[in-house]
Image: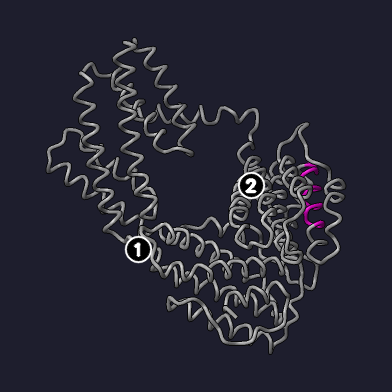
Amino acid sequence: VFVLVGGAIAWLVGMSGWPLRPRAPEAAAVRDAYRAVAASFGSGSDGRAPHHAMEAVAAAVDATTWGSRRDAAGSGRLRALARGAGGILLAGVGLIAETGAPLPAAVRRSVAAMGRLAWPGKDRAPAADEAAAALGPLARTRAGAHFVEVAAKAARAGSASPEAASEASREAVPGAVPAPVPAPVPAPDILASVLGPSPLLPFSTLRIGIAVAASVAVAGLLGMSHIYWVPLTCATVLQGETVLVLTRRAIQRVVGTVAGLLLAGALLAVLHMPPAAALAVVVVLQALMLMVIAKNYALAVAFVTAFAFMILSVISPAPAGPLVLARLRDTLLGVAVALAATYLLWPRVSSRRLPAALATLIARGGDLLTDLMAGVPGAWARQAPLVTAIRRAEAVAQDARAEVPPPRTVEALMPGVAAAERLGYLLLAAQACGVSLNGHDGTARRARAITDAAARQAGAGRPPEADLPVPDTWPPVERELRALTRL
């Protein structure tokens, strides 16, 4: 009963803003997507910059697609804006590839301002014509013209009535271009793949399960009075995937627990608060924990530890000293078990999986490249597998770099990862912008041979190489093929 009552109260508090702004979470996701897209345009030809923007766009598409099932007319404008952000991102990648330089600051500000269209009311971004005027100087190239087109379309959809925007959102697919490109895959199928599960999730799950079971057994053998504190600490510390991240969390957990115990002891010893005042302090501590947990885990642990002890002081008259010592002892044991699991259970899983992830990424890029060069119908179907491969390769590479100490093989593969990711985003951008890759069956086969050879090298744990001539195609693609194969 108490759990149900507590859950009901938490739900009511969490939904308290719904009467005023029922779609505030979706609007915030759309706004953040436009900000991330604009920020990615300030990094020149660095093809790895779109990662954060692509994930932000995918989150916005996912949020607004879920909302559209409840009220298609009401959330259609947000859905159109979210998909428009994806089109702007891919068009911007193509434009940066053509110019080799970041987009002008005025353009980045204009794109970021378009995110304000997600919020109804007086705080609105420029209208469609104003946005198009700000982006107009970029329309001299095919990618620039497409950039202006998708930006103006997204601005118009954001300024339209909910019913009109709902209808427009069915057409505002990221990367949609005029014929002769075949009809694209729906945007959620392309962008939501960025939010897929981590390729290391099974290993993290097994590590947590084994460690928690071991911590319960150890706590039981030692006859601890609060056995649940040990596995709870262990599971909390293991909320990560790499040795570096988990070690950092273990240290922060210990430091935060000690600080929280000192804080709780000071509050209980000095203030001598009645129960009502103690509950008020509990609310303040909970609020502080929620405010800082995303930025500083140690500080959040300090507040949540003090929060727990303030509650215990209200419901139990027992002396606080023994309870503080028990909490510290259980925390140290839980952290010790978590660290043992970190360094004994799959500590090198990321670096061992990196060659296969890179080989898959190169192969998926080769699929799209050869289809585009050969003019194969249905090349849009290659987008989702390529986006998924980019996301997974980047996740594995980041985790592999965080292993302690980092393996030498990882550093040797990093240039190939960067080049393969840049090539993948360039291919997505070329397809979205309708840039011709100047291909035919013969050059497509040569490109396929290059990517196949590079994928085999990467899969064997060696830097991707291919002693084959790069075919003539779009200059940015040629550049990245040479970088990928070290020619």
Residue found 73% across the figure and 71% down from its top: 182
Magenta range is 148-161
Q: How is the image coloured?
A: one colour
Label 2 crowd (10 A; few <14 / some 14-19 / many >=20): many
Q: Nearer the viewer, residue 186 or 221?
A: 221
Residue found 21% across the figure and 22% down from its top: 321
Secondary structure at numbered mark 1: loop
Amino acid carrying mark 1 in the image: Arg
- Left or right of 173 in this view: 466: left
- Which quadrant would residue 20 be assigned to in this image? top right
Sequence-wise first label, 1 or 2: 2
Q: Nearer the viewer, residue 389 or 178?
A: 389
- Left or right of 467 in this view: 40: right
| Furthest residue toward bottom | 442
Q: Position of residue 206 (x, y in %)?
A: 31, 57
Majority secondary structure in the magenta region: helix
Q: Position of residue 199 (x, y in %)?
A: 44, 62
- Which quadrant would residue 407 be assigned to in this image? bottom left
Q: Which mark is residue 64?
A: 2
Asked if the magenta segment contains residue 385, the reply would be no
How many marks the image carries: the answer is: 2
Label 1: which residue? 348
The mark lying in front, picked from 1 and 2, is 1
